[in-house]
Amino acid sequence: MEIPPEGALGLLALGAVGIKAWRQARKEAGEPSHWYRKSPENDDKTHEAEKND
Amino acid sequence: MTKQKVLLIGWDAADWKVIHPLIDAGKMPTLKQFINEGVMGNLATLDPPLSPIMWTSIGTGKTADKHGVMGFTQPREDGSGIQPVLSTSRKVKAVWNILMQAGYKSHVIGWWPSHPADPINGVCISNFYHHATGALDDEWNMAQGTVHPPELAETLAELRVHPEELTASHIAPFVPDLEKIDQTKDQRLLSIAKITAEASSMHAAATWIMENQPWDFLAVYYDAIDHYCHGFMKFHPPHREGIPRDLYDFYNGVVEGGYRFHDMMLERLLQLAGDDTTVIICSDHGFHPDHLRPIQLPQEPAGPAAEHSPYGMIAMRGPAIKQDQLIYGSTLLDITPTILTLFDLPTARDMEGRPLLQAFKQAPDIKVIDSWEEIAGDCGMHDVDAEQDPWMEQEALDQLVALGYIEPPGENVQKTVENNARESKYYLARVYLSKNDYANALPLLEELFAKYPDQSRFGLRLAKVYLNLERIAEARRVTDETIAVSEQTQVQEIKDNFAQQKAAKEKAEKEKAETEEKSETEESQEIPELPDDATLLEQIRQRNRPTLALLQGNLCLAEEKPEDALAHFQKAQTASPRLPDLHISIAHSYLKMQQLQDAEEAFFQALEINPDSAAALYGLGLVYLQMRQFNDAAEALMDSVGRIYHNPNAHYFLGEAFYRLGRFEMAAQSWEVAVTQAPGLKKAHKRLIDIYQRHLNEALKAAQHQEIRDRIVEVPTHSSDQAVDKKTTLKTVLEQSGTHTKKLVGIPPAKIITLVSGLPRSGTSMMMQILQAGGLDLLTDEKRNADEHNPLGYFELEAIKNLKQDKSCLASAQGKVIKVIAQLLPALDKGYHYRIIFMLREIHEVLQSQQTMLNQAESDKDKLGQTFQQQLHRIQVWLRKQNNIEVIYVKYQEVIQHPLQAIEKLNDFLDGVLDVEKSLEVVDVNLYRARG
């Protein structure tokens, strides 16, 4: 199944697996895969690293 | 143990009136197949139709007076304001707690309210889980207590979807022309993204649990349909006058899109559940999608609930469930008893619902116990000490403020908390009204009407209660007062608006004159002259005429003056022909005048406006009974109870129709339902005695009803639900009297703050005197003078009352003694070391003494006492955990009766610094005034 990086309602309806697959596709397309969460060490670089991932 | 799995899916506000056209158009294929393979029907809602109250009723099988969840918000325990309603407000077991006790593994996702998450044997995710509070680039932390067990919090937090993650691809199915919308002016697309992301978060959590955890029962709640509807039902086809055409064109597909999204999510849930699982989909109320959509919402708290319809939906599918059948007369109180029956567990007499037997292929064996609340063992509820009644906590707090022991909260906070308490009382009154329990509703409404005469909703409901109690004169008085106050309020509102407009105009003109930029062609808009008060009043009366006429007519009807009533109703009809319930009132006037055909026609007109009106069908049944058309009467009354099952009179008259048709078993069954719903319905007991004796040969049952009938008194009394065993709660504290543990070894006395604590009026002032006489240095400011309640003074420090906000006064208390009431102890600065002399006194004596001091009535003493005891217990548990605090519990009575013994123990606690002889002189038996 082809997963568009921009996502689709159908992927959200698939639940956990759909969201994970979409975020993976987004990451592979060079976009941030995730909303921002600070690491437990309060590492401000996490988000930037993710953006550039 | 029966191998059974049940999946309960909550779709807030889902309504068959929206779903059916979508199914017919092939737009909800999963639900279509689901109902073909199972049963479906309406699910009657409860009043007030507020989601936290109702989802708790769905999860417990009990109404709000029993389960304790009373609205969207509750006061904070520390009195600093209000907060969203919490799971700890629920006083009874939910179905997942019961199933855990029975050995089944349960998971609960997003139920409202469920924060903090219940410590059940499966996963519980609270209703705080899915709300994103910041932008995409902000941290998105999760509140403590959102996920149980906490070790899954990290995994589940990752699955949340942030609204700003969504793209045009997600929103286009709701709004195809989204690119034409100027989002700087119109925020509705963001609102759709938020609702969709939140539903996706809950769904992701539910599916992850189903994929990764074993389960017997799983409940998942989606609030999105309700939110799509509140935001966009006004744009749902058909287009209505007054709705801007361009907005309609953009947003007319949002509600449909929301339902289709839920159909897609349902498909995934069913895949994961498997065919051997019984699946129940239900909503707490419906949402008017048609001409019954209100044009204007009431300007009152929870006003948007006026958009809700009284019929939610239910659909069930599973191995034991019939296929492709309709079920009737279900209420949301029936869900929990039905789930228990599916698990072959007993339902309980203290639940108000019953299992939906008509849905089962084969009638299951029904077992009933008195109450699941009595069954001991771990059920995954929060510690009993954490379960609080926030409203009583607030009253306890108010009592402490009134007694002068803590500072009142700021004016705004106080107002907010007071408003919440007001709404809570109003909702509770409505719960009682919905159960025809006028005895309990009446004092609440009388109190609200007396305190807030400007709020017509209180007066109008109070008048209705008086009408039902046949106290017609009082009904008329309250109605007249309510109308008069309401008219004056409206006059004042018009005047205020006029003054505001005038001021704004003058300001604009002044600014223009100053800048001299006014063009010659530009003319300022004239504000029309404000009419005098009498003219304004007349205009308001014209505007309100239909509603006023309806009120007056109903009063006349209650006074047995149907002709006068009809005249009022006809005036209302001229002004507003489609006023809800008007035709029902007209029909009842005709019915009283024995103009049966006119009555029939008026009921039909009511049904033409609202084909689902249970009240109109009920009235039609009465007409047919009088016309002696018993088949038609039975049919209409069955249709009525099929829509709103809880209507004892409808069941009573249905019994009459069956009786006349010679169907005695059915008649007895209907009358039994009537007395179950309204145990005081004497006429139904009378009919049951007769039918069991004369037609069904059941002498025992006849005797039982005779006995019940003889016991019925005219005015029902308040029910008492003492949830806490007072003695047990108090004992846990009292048993430790005189004992203490040493925690402050090696701390110099000059660094230790000695506190005298306890409930106000538990002997703290006497203890301060003992310590002073014994040679200790007290820190007081003597701002509070001695009075007849404390003849030797209060020994207080004013600054301590504000301890929650300002702890600086503690610095000067080192090496000294200060008095702090128990409720303020958790606010102590952890940087100091404390010795606490905690005074204990029988709670009824404490309350008696407080009430004497405040000159209060005694009516709420029991509940207040319970709350104080629960607080004491929690504080004692908290004290045990503090390493910087040593405590000795001292019984007031022991000090009075055995002063030497008590003071020697105290001296031991204080490392022998007291002059025991001098302390002994202080104990004044006369202070023990509250006893006897």
Image (cartoon, coloured by chain):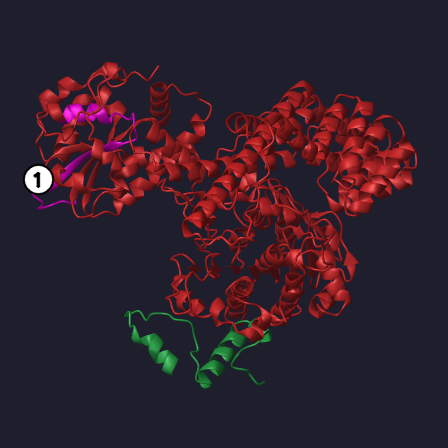
Q: Quadrant of the N terminus of chain B?
A: bottom right
Q: Is residue B446 above or below residue B657?
A: above
Q: Quadrant of the C terminus of chain B?
A: top left
Magenta-tinted stretch? B742-771
| Residue B369 % position (x, y) | 60, 43
Question: Is residue B759 covered in magenta?
Answer: yes
Rendered image quadrant of residue B119: bottom left
Q: Residue at x 75, y 46 (%)?
A: B643
According to the image, label 1 marks what residue? B749
- Of B717 and B22, nearer the camera is B22
Q: Which structural element holds mark 1?
A: helix
| Residue B438 seen from this side | no
Is residue B593 toward the left or the right of residue B324 in the image? right
Q: Residue at x 24, y 19 (%)?
A: B790
Identify by letter the chain in green: A
- Of B480 and B408, nearer the camera is B480
| Residue B18 % position (x, y) | 71, 59
Rendered image quadrant of residue B46: top right
Q: Is residue B186 above or below residue B430?
A: below
Identify by letter the chain in red: B
- Of B156 and B341, nearer the camera is B156
Rendered image quadrant of residue B441: top right
